[in-house]
Amino acid sequence: MKRPFPLAVAQLGPIHLRDSKAAVVARLIELLKEAHARHAHFVVFPELALTTFFPRYWMTDEAEIDRYFEASMPNADVQPLFDLARQYGIGFYLGYAELTPERERFNTSIIVDRQGHIVGRYRKVHLPGHDDHKPAAPFQHLEKKYFQVGNEGFKVWDTMDTRMGMCICNDRRWPETFRVMGLQSAEVVVLGYNTPSHNIHWSEPPHLRMFHHLLLLQAHAHENALWVGAAAKCGAEDGFHMIAGSAIVSPTGEVVAQSASEEDELIFHHCDLALGDTFRQHVFNFAKHRRPEHYQLIVDRVGAGKPLG
Ligand code: ING
């Protein structure tokens, strides 16, 4: 029996240093209106969806850094988005930089349900990049400097008649992310990402950024019988380019919707949650087929070590 979950993914084009949060929220609202027109029940916005990807810049002044963070959620800047989403009865995922009252800083996302309640919060676990200044590099990638490692793990929430998990950007490169949510019986995982096109460590062929992005979404969706919705913030932010490729991926591993631009763009799919059931009952029936007694290294070791043989 079909279990419909009309899902939209709202891709954002560039957010420049000069763009105000109010101007960005107005763009998010336009995308929300389009999601409403498509009769979506949920829409995924990107990682750090309210500001430019500021970890590309070396900053030392605390007040300057704080400008990119939200001290409360919701707040005056984003309230119009929350209000309209509740009016439409559309839930959403939103990525933003979180500053806690104790002045901890996280790369954070939330799931808001169709009644406008924040049902879940996630703080990014896999922080890529570096924490030192690399003046010779064309841009920095200072997530390890500006954010602390997420301290709330990977959770899954019973909400909107499904079980939904979430993660952020680099998390999608690590199989453990999706397996831990699959083991909590997730049916849908949503995420946002900001992925620079240029690799500062070696001269990587450009096509590989998009190839790896889609390869990982498709593999992790299929091996955990998940629907995956991934929203890019993309295009050239003050000249620094990030890939697009926003996508909705089925538990079969097939990309069923993908963005065609590097601008604000909504993609949509009438997901049927029942499609994951057959994979969970058969080929990826974890209880029947997994052998954790042989996986101990995955937890015991951080880095690669000596062979066991
Ligand atoms: N961005 C990138 C990502 O994981 C990256 C960083 C790109 C790491 C390519 C490795 C290879 O998509 C964020 N924000 O995590």
Image: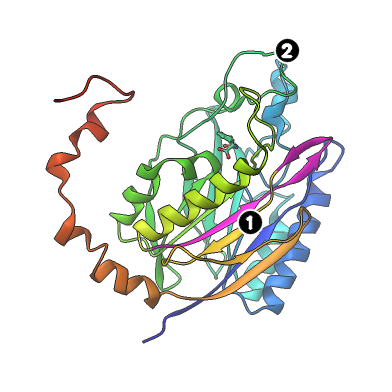
Q: Position of residue 160 (x, y in %)?
A: 45, 71
Q: Position of residue 74 (x, y in %)?
A: 63, 51
Report if residue 165 is visible in the image. Answer: no
Residue at left offset 47%, top offset 67% = 250
Q: Position of residue 191 (x, y in %)?
A: 54, 52
Taking depth in this image into account, of 200 and 302 the one nearest to the observer is 200
Taking depth in this image into account, of 135 and 165 the one nearest to the observer is 135
- Find the residue positioned furthest to the right: 18
Please identify the dominant SS of the magenta region. strand
Instruction: Locate the C terminus by quadrant.
Output: top left
Residue at left offset 60%, top offset 41% = 208
Question: In the image, what residue type sits under mark 1?
Answer: Ser
Taking depth in this image into account, of 256 and 145 the one nearest to the observer is 256
Question: Where is ligand 1, by quadrant?
Answer: top right
Q: Position of residue 92 (x, y in %)?
A: 58, 62
Mark 1 touching mark 2, by CB under 8 A? Answer: no
- Find the residue positioned furthest to the bottom: 1
Q: Is residue 142 above or below residue 218?
A: above
Instruction: Locate the N terminus by quadrant.
Output: bottom left
Q: Is residue 216 magenta?
A: no
Residue at left offset 72%, top offset 47% = 234
Q: What is the C-alpha distance between the residues marked 1 and 2?
A: 31 Å
**What label does residue 246 carry, if any?**
1
Does residue 210 appear to the left or right of 282 in the view shown? right
Residue at numbered disc 2: 135
**SS at badge 2:** loop
Colour logic:
rainbow
Question: In the image, what residue type sits under mark 2?
Answer: Pro
Report the span colored magenta.
Answer: 226-242
